[in-house]
Amino acid sequence: MDLNLNEDQKRAVYSDSRALLIVAGAGTGKTRVLTTRAARLIKENPDARYLLLTFTKKAAREMTTRVRELIEEDTKNRLYSGTFHSFCSNIIRRRSERVGLTNDFVIIDESDSLDLMKKVFSRIYSKEKIDSLIFKPKDILSLYSYARNNNQDFIEIVQRKYKYVNFEDIKKIISLYELNKKERNYLDFDDLLMYGLLAIKTLEKSPFDEVLVDEFQDTNQIQAEMLYYFYDLGSRISAVGDDAQSIYSFRGAYYENMFNFIKRLDAEKIILSSNYRSTQQILDIANSIIQSSYSSIKKELVANVRLKENVKPKLVIVSDDWEEARYVAREMQKFGEKGLKVAALYRAAYIGRNLESQLNSMGIKYSFYGGQKLTESAHAKDFMSFLRVFVNPKDEIALIRILKMFPGIGEKKAEKIKDAVISGDNLKKALSKEKNLEELNIFFDKLFKITDWHDLLELVFDFYKDIMNRLYPENYEEREEDLIKFMDMSSNYDNLVEYLEAFTLDPVEKSEFDNNNVILSTIHSAKGLEFDVVFLLSVIESVYPHFRAQSTDEIEEERRLFYVAITRAKQRLIFTFPRHSKKSRGYFAKNTISPFLREKDNYLEVFIAR
């Protein structure tokens, strides 16, 4: 067991409260506490079962490995760990009849959901009408998802957003979207949570002695409701989170869950404030910024690290955003040459583009966090479509994607073939009517004779390589390497359905395969990470807080985002402030410094770059 814990961490690990909220400030060892608590419970109660819920499969995998190392034995049948969505998928398949589903449903990701919504729009409106609408398929899908995750009335949300639209049309859009999913046995990400909650409600008793939850501040109202039901069914609940790092309201995360958990379950609250990541000078400015928040759980982070030199955070003033990029690139190169891991963080991707250009011109290699996921790229989606059709020949999204890869097959012809398959024709018969698809028909003949799913991956890869070369000749080699990595990961899964589901629910970052010391990232994508040196770019008003943040709650979330960026830094923290920024028409606008940094001079060393 890991006994190298401070007093607050020990209290959290050994608490016997039925409901426990561990408020873990940035860098205070929340992962160690949660895994040590799980290990302690398993060791003391070998016949009990525990559930560990996270937000990424990577976190679940790392925590499970850590628990196994601590107890020095296997956790099989004693600890189930996974993301909320993967857990929901599992319980829905087990109790599908109880919630009105079949257990062979197909999970569709956000891009598939958008494709389905676009088809709904095209059934209701002409192309000209769609072009003139003030709302687009992506807008409606986003609002619908937000409403479902927050238990809010969808039409009321639409009315607040769009005052002069035909609300009957909006209702029809959602009705058709839901009908299309039902007819095709599709579940989107929001369905997983909603049906997952329904499945939990069908239980008479909880199968878990305790449910442990990571990053509780990122839960939405449905996820919190799941925990309350488990509590009512007899489970203990231990949740770890930090209200000061709640930055995902746009995804439905509900900040108030941290406070409601304490009230609703009369939970014990333990605060972790001893920080094992950053210097005290970095923590001083972080504490100062978050303590100005009107609605945070009060805590003050105290450094528990020893460094030879403790350097004050620096505010570097530059003439404009191009000079900012040149300055940061030069400094990142210096720190990188010293073997330090250095990151440039920014509020929105466009802020980092000048820096990307500068690093490229200097020949400095870097990794980019928060870009397109490996399994969301076109070639990976193509590859997965073949596998999806093998699992379900009537998976129309995957089938249409495959058909359109072949010359002479456009949207209309692909739809016609798909309709024939959905209506009852077998796939072979439907494809045989098109000369251009003879090669595909022969391939599917071979595919459906495969018994070992690992052989299936090899067959699809060999067939798709030539197609990929034709479709994406400009960077074919890089795409081929991606697919090889994707195939290599199959050894972690027991079957094809599990393999496909894992990458649909939690896409792989391309950066997971990189080992560069120089990192570019949005702040949202950097949450949970740490770097020796952090540059926080463009600390100007209108960026921190974002100009669209108008309400008090929105501005407070911007404050928390700023705090998250600061607390990624271990040794050095550098803010950059461009006096002027180039706008779209070529003129330079004068900037003012972020209100979050005003009157913080005593925490900063101010430097004017020449």
Image: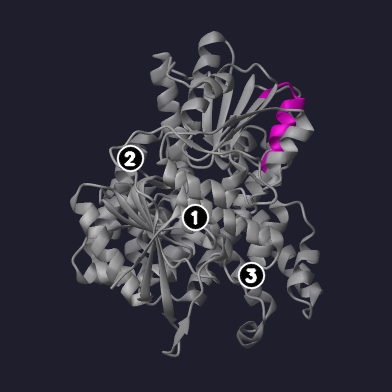
Foreground label between 3 and 2: 3
The image's colouring method is: one colour
Q: In this view of the protein, which residue sits in the foreground, 22 or 399?
A: 22
**At which x and y percent is residue 227?**
69, 33
Q: Which residues are magenta?
A: 223-236
* Residue 432 visible at all: no
Task: From this view, report whether residue 77 is shown above or below residue 425.
Answer: above
Q: Residues within 10 Å of mark 2 (few under 14, many from 20)?
A: some
**Callout 2 secondary element:** helix
Q: Which residue is mark 2?
A: 454
Q: In this view of the protein, which residue sits in the foreground, 22 or 190?
A: 22
Q: In this view of the protein, which residue sits in the foreground, 360 or 209?
A: 360
Q: Residues within 10 Å of mark 1 (few under 14, many from 20)?
A: some
| Residue 170 falls left or right of residue 105 | right
Q: Which residue is mark 3?
A: 139
Disc 1/disc 2 C-alpha distance (Å):
36 Å
Q: Earlier in the sequence, mark 3 or mark 1?
A: 3
Snapshot quadrant of residue 233: top right
Q: Earlier in the sequence, mark 3 or mark 2?
A: 3
Residue at (52, 15) in percent of width and height: 40
Q: Is 183 included in the stretch rendered in magenta? A: no
| Residue 97 falls left or right of residue 567 | right
Q: Which residue is mark 1?
A: 524
